[in-house]
Amino acid sequence: MGIRHGFGLWMQPLTQTRGWPRETYALAIAIQNISWGVAGIFAGMVADRFGAFRVLVLGALIYALGLVGMAHADTPLLLMLSTGVMLGVAQAGTTYAVVYGVVGRNVPAERRSWAMGMTAAAGSFGQFLMVPLEGHLISSLGWQEALGVLGLAALLIAPLAWGLREPHLAGNQASAPREQSIFHALKEAFGYRSFQLLMAGYFVCGFQVVFIGVHMPSYLKDHGLSPQVASYALALIGLFNVIGTYAAGALGQRFEKRFILSFIYFARAVVIGIFIWAPLSPASVYVFAAVMGVLWLSTVPPTNAAIAQIFGVAHLSMLSGFVFLSHQIGSFLGVWLGGFMYDRTGSYDLVWYIAIALGVFAGLVNLPVKEAAIERGPRLSPASA
């Protein structure tokens, strides 16, 4: 998570070196996000059946190759394939849907939301740690060499994945019987109103965070602020995201998750509005980054915990993957629309306003979510599944 959080730092050096418009890079990141979402469904299915270890190792290898490919992509097509498709597939195999499946299957329900918050907080700390490091690598080694170093760092995922082995899932389904097929799990989820509402909210989450994460460095530079301000701002988002994700997970044990999610989305709309209407300065950027950081990925623990609470954990990685696909469709639109509107109007203003309106929308649609376990026949309760 730390590596991908800093991709906005490469927009200007890469596009200026290649002589490409910002929309080209934005489209590559948009493809990355949609690839992440689509591949995440299948990565979740494999992880649910065979365990996360194999998926994580393969994801680490693709991650390293994708970063090296990004460094040497000299045509827009190669950029789309490396930065877009390969890195998207790699992230699908190394991030939330796969890891949360392990957490959901191995942590008791009464501590599941807290554990998911703790896991998200660890990913958030990676964002805080890696963004300044990535900025330093770009300035000291050059943007291409920096990507090579990150490719080596991505390989560390493989040995760390050893601790997430689940021997009882390694092809031996006799020890983990399922009373619900993939088809029936999907039919049940997509026919359930609360699942649809969670997907709608997650769409907005993706639109907002990826637009801000990728385009804010360029937005700040356009307004005369130094690249260091953007690096520090992204690092602050990561640091305060540690607090926000942990708090959201912990609060999810005590309060209804729909209220937590609605508060987060309404608060984002308010914070973005204040940021774009207030005078811009390094201080205002840092305050925005800190507050937005608390709200950044704090939607992840309550959303995934709600899915587990409603449907059980047998197909948790897969269902989380489908909800995350909605997030990534929002990410695609947010990052691409930012580049598209900038290249045509010279401003990001309209996209900021769309992000505010979507925040209000997401706050409203999460209020009717029903978190109670779905009612099934006696052999198909979420607990037995």
Image (tube, helix red, strand yellow):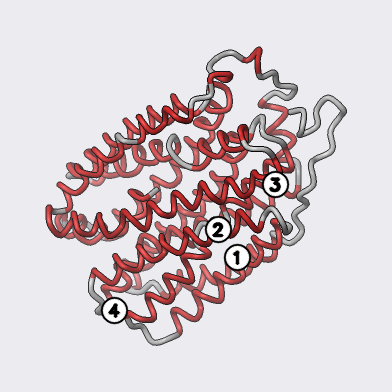
Mark 2 to mark 3 CA distance (whole Å):
18 Å
Residue picked out by circle 1: 264
Which residue type does callout 1 highlight?
Ile
Of the two numbered discs 3 and 4 on the same chain, state the one appearing first in sequence: 3
Determine the residue positioned at 61% across, 49% down: 114
Among the 4 quarters of the image, the one containing residue 186: top right
Marks 4 and 2 sit apart, C-alpha to C-alpha, by: 29 Å
Residue picked out by circle 4: 223
C-alpha distance separating marks 1 and 3: 18 Å
Location of residue 200 with respect to 147 vertically, above or below: below
Residue type at the position of mark 4 = His
Q: Dots 1 and 2: beta carbons under 8 Å?
A: yes
Of the residues under marks 1 and 3, which one precedes in the sequence?
3
Rendered location of residue 169, percent (x, y): 57, 20
Q: Position of residue 25 (x, y in %)?
A: 29, 54
Q: Nearer the viewer, mark 1 or mark 3?
A: 1
Residue closer to the observer: 361 or 75: 361
Quickly name the residue at label 2: 298
Q: Is residue 313 left or right of residue 346?
A: right
**Mark toward the start of the polypeptide (4 vs 2):** 4
Labels 3 and 4 touching (C-beta < 8 A):
no
Q: Is residue 374 above or below residue 165?
A: below
Specify the amino acid type for callout 3.
Answer: Phe
Local packing at callout 4 (Cα closer than 10 Å; few below 14, some 14-19, many 20+) is few
